[in-house]
Amino acid sequence: MSHIHLPDGVIPVFWWVVGYVLTAAMLGLAISRTNSTEARRKVPLLGIIAAVMLIGQSIPLGFIPFHLGLAVLAGIILGPWLGFMAAFISNMFLALIGHGGITVVGLNTVVVGSEVIIGYLLYNIFRRATVEHILPVILATALTLIITIAFMIGVVAIAQVNPALVLMGEDAGAIKDSVVVDSPVALSLRRFVTIIVPVAAIGIAIEAFATGLIVRFILGVRPEIVGAPARERER
Amino acid sequence: MDIAFIDNLAYNRDSVMHRASAVSKVLMVALVIAAVVISTEVVVFIMALAFLLMAFLISNLPVLRILPFAGYALVFSLVFAVSSTGGGITPLVIMLKAVTAAVAMLLLITTTPYPQIFALGRKIFPTILIDAMLVTYRSFFILMEQVERVIIALRMRGAYSPLRVAGNLNIMGKVIGHGFIHAWELSENMQNAMLIRGYRGGMPVSATRKYSIKYSLLPVLLGASVLVVAVFA
Amino acid sequence: MSEIARIGCISHIYPDQTTVKICGLEFSVMEGEKVVILGPNGSGKTTLLQHLMGLLRPVEGEVRVFGVDPSKHFNDIIENYGVVFQHVEDQLVAPTVWDDITFSPRNYGYPEDKIESLANEIIERIGIADLKTKIPHYLSGGEKKKVALAGAMIAHPKLLILDEPFEGLDPKSKHDMLMLLNEFNRIYGTTIILTTHDINIVPIFADRAYVMVRGNIILSGAPQDVFTEAELLRSINLEPPLLTVLVSGLRDRGVSIDYTNDQEQLLDEIVALIKKP
Amino acid sequence: MSEIARIGCISHIYPDQTTVKICGLEFSVMEGEKVVILGPNGSGKTTLLQHLMGLLRPVEGEVRVFGVDPSKHFNDIIENYGVVFQHVEDQLVAPTVWDDITFSPRNYGYPEDKIESLANEIIERIGIADLKTKIPHYLSGGEKKKVALAGAMIAHPKLLILDEPFEGLDPKSKHDMLMLLNEFNRIYGTTIILTTHDINIVPIFADRAYVMVRGNIILSGAPQDVFTEAELLRSINLEPPLLTVLVSGLRDRGVSIDYTNDQEQLLDEIVALIKKP
Ligand SMILES: Nc1ncnc2c1ncn2[C@@H]1O[C@H](COP(=O)(O)OP(=O)(O)OP(=O)(O)O)[C@@H](O)[C@H]1O
Ligand SMILES: Nc1ncnc2c1ncn2[C@@H]1O[C@H](COP(=O)(O)OP(=O)(O)OP(=O)(O)O)[C@@H](O)[C@H]1O
Ligand SMILES: [Mg+2]
Ligand SMILES: [Mg+2]
């Protein structure tokens, strides 16, 4: 859910360049970590999971102004390295349909990519503690989002952007109503906390809950997708 | 959904701008963004926007349906503008920066099919990334069609009541889970298809129309003049 | 018998500006009728069905189903529909077969015991009791179609709309499905509208057939009437069913013999003619 | 004529432990043969084809194609294959029709001018010149099949494997596709293996037909030989083609007449018998 809808030209050059440099370094590492025959086999899966992330982001959840990011799920399915590449691809696409600027792709990839990686790591840690799959997924998703949102607030604070924008950034209308209209001056930190924390909490809850539902469905049908043993079919 | 709309315009329409080469239009965007980054002069952005709008007018596109896409940039820059503290840049300039860059990007993507843009990335990005992006592009349409069919089926089966939030979430979870399995199966099928068709890395991308050098000058000139004005204004 | 569905000359514009005009002879379906729509790929069959379901709204012309415009009064008439789409996979949305079959009545708020008895009845009739607890994803193509049909029929809809329901089915499954449709039509008076590329379905199933070409309804009528237009059918690359062709061929060769859909009867007649002194 | 493919008794276990055993009569395909595999849904046709393609590896039994085990020596023989999957949608991977058609030869490293001339030849022959610059998602179902076929045939593969290629096609498109396959077989000696539920394809196309039921190959032989086993076919719910049935019916009624696949010839013979003094 945490993807920055920032346009071009508002973030200081230094920061978006740093975003790109970090992304390039991570991509380089990711590519050197996947062996090339394996990578060739995985091209379709990588491309398709990126498409799924994109679709998750373009279907509104009914009337709730949130979109699913599915980054943690991507991490669970693809692993950290391919997952990072998927984060890059889906962010590149979003920029190429005018959702967020092209200069911010680097920063966005760092944010979503760390969601992928942290989600993957947490899922594997939690899974070791239990034979269950759904609870670890929900926990990993929630915790990942808390970490990355904190991280992202850091990023945008450095970049001198109002953090409110980021957390509510999934829906342009919501911002217009809740921020622009009533607040011609900068939000105070206290106001920020009182407005944003509940919103973020709801967002995190929805994403974690939805990811849990999706994984529950997958476990019932094709458990091997999320790394569980294949289900024996009664015939 | 936006992707399908944009893709359709880039692919199925024809105009001077459509016939300019992909490189020239990518260059145009790069130049405009460079101008956006360095300039703080309102006149520069007014001029850039005027040029871009003129380019839109000769591009045989439903301009009034495309420009709202720049609304994202407008709204977000507005928030940034009203809430940013200091820096010496006026809110108007921040908004103009964002909108100018966004409009340039829209001009590129509504006149250039995505694969043509990715193909340019071959020089910079590793093969696996570009190939995966092409797969993303292709599978987006396959999956989107599937999602649309599932939603239609849900409607026909009476599962479309906006009043039951919990029920809707549950259904959404199922639908997305369902979509995920389909996506997985699609990836297995595509993987098989690519193996058996001899895939060794490097998906070819050929032009879908004849590009003209003459027309390609137009976007390059547009971008260059914006940048020149930005430097000297 | 009252009219259930009617389509005037309509046109529809898809998002990419493809315009589909559905026109020509009038399209009208009476209560309890079994209607088959034939036509080459891209002739507008699916588009027509989607208008009947109220999923598309024509830019021109009128669609009436159950006396109202289905795209405007969708929610009022939706409970009367049972639908099986061309891609059945995409309509099986629940995690188990049982959940999927009971999906619609649950959405319509039927009481639990009613749902259960309806579900058991349809499962019995379609003969898929052993699939109840299975996962739709693992069913074979034929089984998926049956489950989809069960889900469409469970609440005894007045109108059943099926888009190429026999595609990918083996001959036995196809035959079973046909029998089942006939049975429902007989017992509940269900009106059935289906599309297919298999012209041999028509003589053994349809009360009325429509033939579409590029959006034009160029033929309509009882199967025999449609098939005797052999020239017209051939001009649009539809071959009439073989029995009809053979009878025509014999008549062309001066043998006086009647049209029939029954191969045994045809054989008997031929043999009688041969053995005639 | 040498043997191109052979399958011994194999068994395969899918990830969910479904075991598919393919056994019974021997499956063997000679160079230049046109082979049709029939069988109900879930009988293992697709599984068999995937073994031939080397995409699955049997846990038991042996598969040999071009003299080797295709799952082990995949890369050595892959250039000899042309494949059209049941879901053509999933095999069109490149961004434009031209790129997709030229996908294989490009990956095999053919020189650019060779690729171009091959592509133009196949595009010409299949009649899709106007689609060259289109992108796959703006094609109709029938057009997608044609493009997939072009991509499979471009490098004149020795072996063409098609999984239900006629599904969803209207009669004219089906006929065109059959003609094309016959032409390739004649000109390039292409060996063709296809599955279908349409038994009427067999007499007009196949050199040899296999009939599978639950993994067992229960019938094999030239079409006439297979169809005369009417009892066996019926026991597995396959109806022989109508012409064969009619001839059988006449013979059962004591008329002496020969089996034929040509309806005109049949009609002439019947008329001759009737008019005989
Ligand atoms: N979503 C869509 N967007 C654009 N054009 C469409 C769309 N769906 C159908 N068409 C076009 O509308 C026309 C009619 O299509 P339709 O699907 O109704 O044909 P059909 O008779 O159902 O064909 P088939 O036998 O292949 O299913 C075709 O020219 C098709 O290309
Ligand atoms: N990926 C899979 N996982 C588990 N079981 C499978 C899978 N694919 C096929 N099967 C099972 O293997 C058996 C043979 O299936 P196969 O797809 O080969 O049949 P088919 O003859 O091609 O049927 P159809 O005519 O419906 O295409 C069936 O019982 C099917 O359920
Ligand atoms: Mg259709
Ligand atoms: Mg199959």
Image (cartoon, coloured by chain):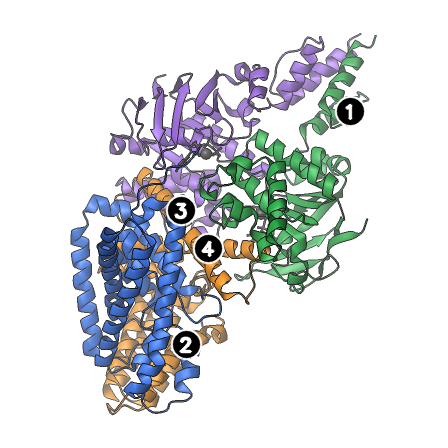
Chain colours: A blue, B orange, C green, D purple
Say which quarter of the image contains residue B25: bottom left
Say which mark, if any, is on residue B175. 4
Q: Nearer the viewer, mark 4 or mark 3?
A: 3
Per the image, label 4 sits on a secondary structure element best described as helix
Distance between mark 3 and mark 2 Cα atoms = 36 Å
Is residue D184 visible to us here? yes
Question: Can you say whether D53 is above or below B41 in the image?
Answer: above
Mark 2: which amino acid? Ala
- The residue carrying mark 3 is A220
How crowded pointer 4 is (Cα within 10 Å; few <14, some 14-19, many 20+) is rated as many
Q: Nearer the viewer, residue A167 or C202?
A: A167
How crowded pointer 1 is (Cα within 10 Å; few <14, some 14-19, many 20+) is rated as some
Q: Nearer the viewer, mark 1 or mark 4?
A: 4
Distance between mark 2 and mark 1 Cα atoms = 73 Å
Q: Please check whether the numbered discs 1 and 4 fall on a single chain.
A: no
Mark 4: which amino acid? Val
How crowded pointer 2 is (Cα within 10 Å; few <14, some 14-19, many 20+) is rated as some
Q: Nearer the viewer, mark 2 or mark 4?
A: 4
Q: Nearer the viewer, residue D168 or C83?
A: C83
Q: Nearer the viewer, mark 2 or mark 1?
A: 2
Per the image, label 1 sits on a secondary structure element best described as helix
Residue at far front of view: C113
- The residue carrying mark 1 is C251
